[in-house]
């Protein structure tokens, strides 16, 4: 009987030692960690992200960044565009991404449509709208472009007044008068516009607003 108690005692001591070692090596971190999304690879600015760009990782409470995204929120960022370089294994926060339809992708930039080029445009035109741009002499469609900025003569963004709505027909009042428009396109796309305007004397641009966005 005494021998059995000795064996049990030794077993309990060994188990306690093993438990202590596990706690120090892994247990403490397991208890103190939560699971978040991290970059599965380095993600460059302008990348349209997919689920494969991310992995799940346990992060110690003291190392968690503010706003870190948990795995169940993955659908909130898939399909969006990275706005900064995200290093492999970095934690993921929503501010790293923007909607795919309003961001400069590779080769795109912001180009100014000079006031003297514009023959017709709506006073309700705002940042984020889509416009079909026509050459007014031939009434030919040049292309469809996203509006990056709508500026007045002092280079201040023209916005809806406080009581204005988002719908085109609700934009009754604005903060100032539109002077020029800045659009998102690539260099060949902008050159196409310039050729149409400068290629025909007296030619201009007709900006036709599209509230429903790009099809």
Image: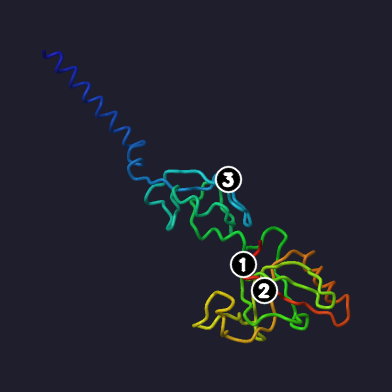
| Callout 3 crowding tier (Cα within 10 Å): few <14, some 14–19, many ≥20 | some
Task: Name the foreground residue: 192 vs 120.
Answer: 120
Task: Name the foreground residue: 31 vs 3.
Answer: 31
Residue 181's label in the rendered image is: none
Q: Position of residue 214 (x, y in %)?
A: 66, 63
| Callout 2 crowding tier (Cα within 10 Å): few <14, some 14–19, many ≥20 | many
| Total numbered labels | 3
Q: Position of residue 158 (x, y in %)?
A: 60, 81
Q: Quadrant of residue 103?
A: bottom right
Measured in 3D between alpha carbons, the distance from the residue under mark 1 to the one under mark 2, in whole angstroms, is: 9 Å
Q: Position of residue 84 (x, y in %)?
A: 58, 58
Picture residue at 45% right of the left edge, 53% below the top: 69
Q: Is the image coloured rainbow, by chain, by secondary structure, or in one colour?
A: rainbow
Residue 212's label in the rendered image is: 1
Q: Is residue 104 left or right of residue 33?
A: right
Q: Which residue is mark 3?
A: 41
Measured in 3D between alpha carbons, the distance from the residue under mark 3 to the one under mark 2, in whole angstroms, is: 40 Å
Q: Is residue 27 left or right of residue 109?
A: left
Measured in 3D between alpha carbons, the distance from the residue under mark 3 to the one under mark 1, in whole angstroms, is: 35 Å
Whether label 1 touches label 2, CB < 8 Å: no
Q: Which residue is mark 2?
A: 209
Q: Quadrant of residue 115?
A: bottom right
Q: Nearer the viewer, mark 3 or mark 2?
A: 2
Q: Is residue 157 left or right of residue 197?
A: left
């Amino acid at each position: 009987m005494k021998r059995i108690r000795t064996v049990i005692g030794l077993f309990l001591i060994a188990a306690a030692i093993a438990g202590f070692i596990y706690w120090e090596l892994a247990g403490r971190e397991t208890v103190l960690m939560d699971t978040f999304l991290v970059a599965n690879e380095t993600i460059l600015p302008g990348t349209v992200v997919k689920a494969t760009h991310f992995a799940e990782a346990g992060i110690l409470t003291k190392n968690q960044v503010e706003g870190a995204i948990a795995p169940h929120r993955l659908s909130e960022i898939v399909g969006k565009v990275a706005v900064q370089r995200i290093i492999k294994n970095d934690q993921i926060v929503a501010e790293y991404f923007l909607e795919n339809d309003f961001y400069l992708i590779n080769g795109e930039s912001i180009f100014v449509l000079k006031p003297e080029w514009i023959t017709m445009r709506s006073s309700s035109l705002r940042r984020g709208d889509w416009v079909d741009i026509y050459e007014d002499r031939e009434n030919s469609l040049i292309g469809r472009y996203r509006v990056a900025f709508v500026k007045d003569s002092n280079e201040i963004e023209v916005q809806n007044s406080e009581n204005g709505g988002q719908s085109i027909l609700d934009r009754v009042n604005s903060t100032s008068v539109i002077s020029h428009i800045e659009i998102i396109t690539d260099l060949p796309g902008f050159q196409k516009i310039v050729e149409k305007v400068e290629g025909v004397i007296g030619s201009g641009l007709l900006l036709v607003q599209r509230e429903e966005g790009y099809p």
